[in-house]
Image (tube, grey):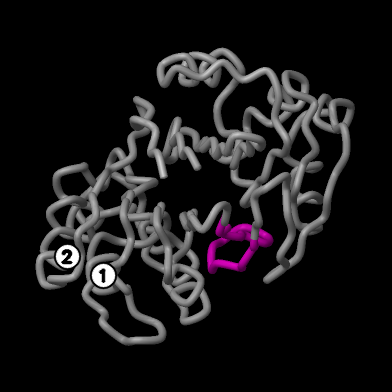
Amino acid sequence: MRVSILASGSAGNLTLLETENTRILVDAGLGKRETLARLAAVGRDISHLDAILITHEHIDHCNGLPQMLALWKAPLYVTGPTMEALQRTLPETFGKRLRGVVTIAHEQAFSIGDIDVRAFPVPHDAVDTIGFTFRADGIKVAICTDLGKLPIHVRVHLRDTDCMILESNHDPEMLKFGPYPWVVKQRILSNIGHLSNNTVSEYLADTDETTGFDARVRYLVLAHLSEENNNPDAARISAKEALDRRPTFAGELLVASQVHPLTPIEL
């Protein structure tokens, strides 16, 4: 499986997962021109998609969806409440360009080509935010961003993962003294906001045999970093401090970018 994180952050999110036979786009937060530019930057020229999956209706995850539907004419996989929200949020061209909608539910397992997918709910201030795990040829990938805390069921879904894309949105001190209005800071810090570097570090240090971080991941990608309230060095150092206390961790720690696509991960 190949994982290409083309963009990650509050200005747009976009990840491409590929096997030899199947291509899935997770979220569509960039427009057509920028999406194609990011694909070209990682050496991909995509003529066909098997599915577009949307995690939730916030604009940084769906802004480019009408253009992606027009470009690839792929079926849309989305929960019912999120679909209703997309219809309210996006322009009329969204409905006109739909080429099929597959409604998915919490904890539902389904297959797209040779990739087995499971959707699971995460706590965020959208109508029905979900994360995903993907399995193919014995490889498991998890995408889990836009959540205010890590409840037990989410931690369980993240176990036995080869590539984990996990939000590390903000540094609490940078957020506290940063430029955001207090009401926005409260939202980010809430249980339906975004994960801090500290929360991620605590999770990575958790050795619980059923709900903790099992340290077997080959690639750990810190994602959805705030450009105002975080920086890659702060997120990396915070995570590394926890990982250094886990002698069994032998994976690679990466940080996804809003500005540049990450070098594709080959699994």
Q: Is residue 39 above or below residue 51?
A: above
For the residues labelled 2 and 1, the Cα–Cα distance comes to 6 Å
Q: Are marks 2 and 1 in contact (CB under 8 Å)?
A: yes
Residue shown at 48% from the left, 77% from the top: 156
- The range drawn in magenta is 118-134
Residue visible at 57% across and 40% down? 61
The 10 Å Cα crowd at callout 1, few under 14, some 14 to 19, many 20 or more, is: many
Q: Is residue 77 magenta?
A: no
Quarter occupied by residue 26: top right
Q: Amino acid at mark 2?
A: Leu
Residue sitting at x 50%, y 42%: 1
Q: Secondary structure at mark 1?
A: helix
Image point 73% across, 35% down: which residue? Answer: 50
Left or right: 158, with 98 as reference point: left
Q: Residues within 10 Å of mark 2 (few under 14, many from 20)?
A: many
Whole-percent x and y of residue 4? 45, 34
In the picture of the structure, the residue carrying the numbered disc 1 is 204
In the foreground, 259 or 135: 135
Question: Is residue 129 one of those drawn in magenta?
Answer: yes
Q: Which of the marked residues, 2 or 1, is nearer the chain's N terminus? A: 1
> Which of the numbered marks, if any, corresponds to residue 239?
none
Residue 89 placement (x, y as % from top left)? 73, 40
Query: Which residue is tagged 2?
Result: 243
For the residue labelled by badge 2, is the local secondary structure a helix, a strand or a loop?
helix
Q: Is residue 18 left or right of residue 77?
A: left
Report the front residue among 46 and 183: 46
Label 1 amino acid?
Leu
